[in-house]
Amino acid sequence: ELKVEQNPLFLSMQEGKNYTIYCNYSTTSDRLYWYRQDPGKSLESLFVLLSNGAVKQEGRLMASLDTKARLSTLHITAAVHDLSATYFCAVDMSDDKIIFGKGTRLHILP
Amino acid sequence: ETGVTQSPTHLIKTRGQQVTLRCSSQSGHNTVSWYQQALGQGPQFIFQYYREEENGRGNFPPRFSGLQFPNYSSELNVNALELDDSALYLCASSLGTGGNTEAFFGQGTRLTVV
């Protein structure tokens, strides 16, 4: 059974600081997603990572994938308040059946 | 905008009732997956439909059932509602089973069971 573990589950940080969210998964997969979710809203796709060593960046967020270690990271650079949200790592089990982590609630303090 | 639409957006039902939720997939997509997201949790895979057939199911009881129509839109039906069924229900459409596209999520249906 595929399991996806994120840590930390809750993160409170100051604006301007850097931090990394970690995502470990238990079996091989050919697709890993990062999503953002604001309270009461649906999922916003941030990144899709398809291959070992993949790195994608959008603004202050950068995601990477190490398929050998079954590890993905979401790095936040110089955090701003607008990045406060819950971030989910999710792994494609097969044929677009997606298994999600529990999410990381990110709270950025001004 | 993902092109995936769900209806209704909010719904309140009484314990024991039945509910039907609807999802229109993105144009060109033939696969719809449904997820349940309880408050404070990550989404949980319920089941997937590919070309009108169920194509995988998560750990949900049989009172959760679904349909996919020839236009690839889909319904999620839940019978004998329980309080714990209160959640955000998300559908995702994709060009699945070997298609090299990502899944796109709708805006969700918030179901409250009282």
Image (tube, helix red, strand yellow):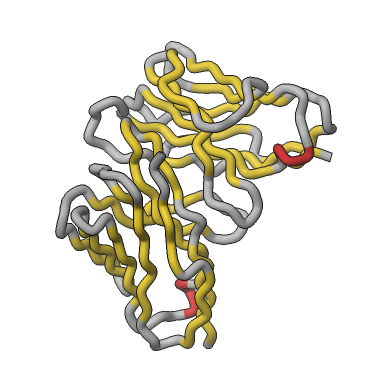
**Quadrant of residue B11 in the image?**
top right
**Quadrant of residue B113 in the image?**
top right
- Whether A96 is drawn above or below B48: the answer is below
Pick the front one: A97 or A82: A97
Is B45 placed left or right of A32 in the picture? right
Name the quarter where the N terminus of chain A is drawn: top left
Residue name at image x 30 percent, y 49 percent: A32
Pick the front one: A98 or A40: A98
Is A80 placed left or right of B28 in the picture? right
Is B58 placed left or right of B8 in the picture? left
- Whether A16 is drawn above or below A68: the answer is below
Residue name at image x 41 percent, y 32 percent: B93
Residue name at image x 36 percent, y 27 percent: B27
Is A74 placed left or right of A103 in the picture? left
Give residue B58's position: percent from left, percent from top.
50, 31
Q: How many marks?
A: 0
Give residue B3's position: percent from left, percent from top.
42, 37
- Whether B30 is drawn above or below B84: the answer is above
Res. A35 visible in picture: no
Res. A78 visible in picture: yes
Residue name at image x 35 percent, y 27 percent: B29
Give residue B14's position: percent from left, percent from top.
84, 32
Pick the front one: B2 or A13: A13
- Whether B104 is drawn above or below B80: the answer is below
Give residue A18's position: percent from left, percent from top.
35, 83
